[in-house]
Amino acid sequence: MSDHQPVLHGVHHTAFPTWKPKETVEFYRDTLGLPVLHAITAKGWGRDEHPDFLHFFFDAGNGAAIAFFYYIGTEPLEEPAGPRGYLGMARHTSWRVETEAELKEWRERLVAKGVTISEEIQHEVIKSLYFRDPNGYPLEISLTTRELGEADAMDASLTLDAMIETFVDGDAPETKTIEDMWRLKGEKVRELI
């Protein structure tokens, strides 16, 4: 057995359905300024019930793309972007900016283009703007306010281990709270000291 482990080299693309192809193109190409990379058109592809479609890609930066499927002649889902509120915002795409000035420029550009955006939200090591595309998909532009290091990775590993032991593998996980998880994580930290 080989010790070689394959490595991922970044996200190639994320993809979403759209029932608003014109608005989607105008938003990503014109409002966000993402260059169009590629478009695939397909007839009779896949399973018998699979509709004809267009699959189009925009350059999301650093070799990544964001893509959309327009399924010809299909009815839109009731909530194509998923639920509203925290569950809807949990599934989102975020772009990175490098400076506070760039974040400000994006805020100004989006507002000038009529996009409703949130206030800037600082959460731990990221400052972000949140907004939605014409399909209702949540988007974010993020500025890293502090570089992550080894201590952050260790903290994250301890947190994830405590999460699994508390809410999945532990006794009566349905009765557990975040405070229970924090206590367990604290115990794990003490074991390292």
Image (cartoon, rainbow, N blue to C red):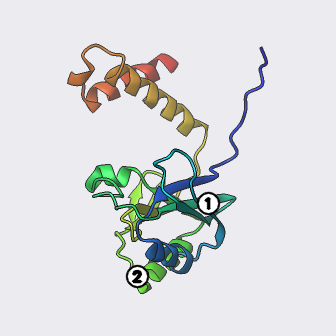
**14 left or right of 124 in image:** right
Question: Label 2 belongs to which residue?
Answer: 111
**179 left or right of 108 in image:** left
Q: Is residue 165 above or below residue 20?
A: above
Which amino acid lies under the numbered mark 1 shown in the image of this protein? Ala
Crowding at dot 2, Cα within 10 Å, few <14 / some 14-19 / many 20+, comes out as: few
Q: Is residue 100 above or below residue 158?
A: below
The quadrant of the picture occupied by the N terminus is top right
- Who is closer to the viewer here, 68 or 62? 68
Q: Is residue 58 above or below residue 4?
A: below
Q: Element at badge 1?
A: strand
* Among the two numbered marks 1 and 2 on one chain, the one whose residue lies closer to the N terminus: 1
Residue at 38% across, 19% down: 165
Disc on res. 65: 1
CA gap, disc 1 and disc 2: 24 Å
- Who is closer to the viewer here, 14 or 19? 19
Q: Element at badge 2?
A: helix
Q: Are marks 1 and 2 in contact (CB under 8 Å)?
A: no
Residue at 64% across, 73% down: 35
Instruction: Mark yes or no: residue 44 visible.
Output: yes
**33 left or right of 141 in image:** right
- Who is closer to the viewer here, 109 or 100? 109
Instruction: Mark yes or no: residue 95 visible.
Output: no
Tell me residue 36's x, y (percent): 63, 72
Tell me residue 99's x, y (percent): 58, 69
Residue at the extreme bottom of the image, as rendered:
112
Q: Nearer the viewer, mark 1 or mark 2?
A: 1
Residue at the extreme left of the image, as rendered:
175
Crowding at dot 1, Cα within 10 Å, few <14 / some 14-19 / many 20+, comes out as: many
Disc on res. 191: none
Which amino acid lies under the numbered mark 2 shown in the image of this protein? Val
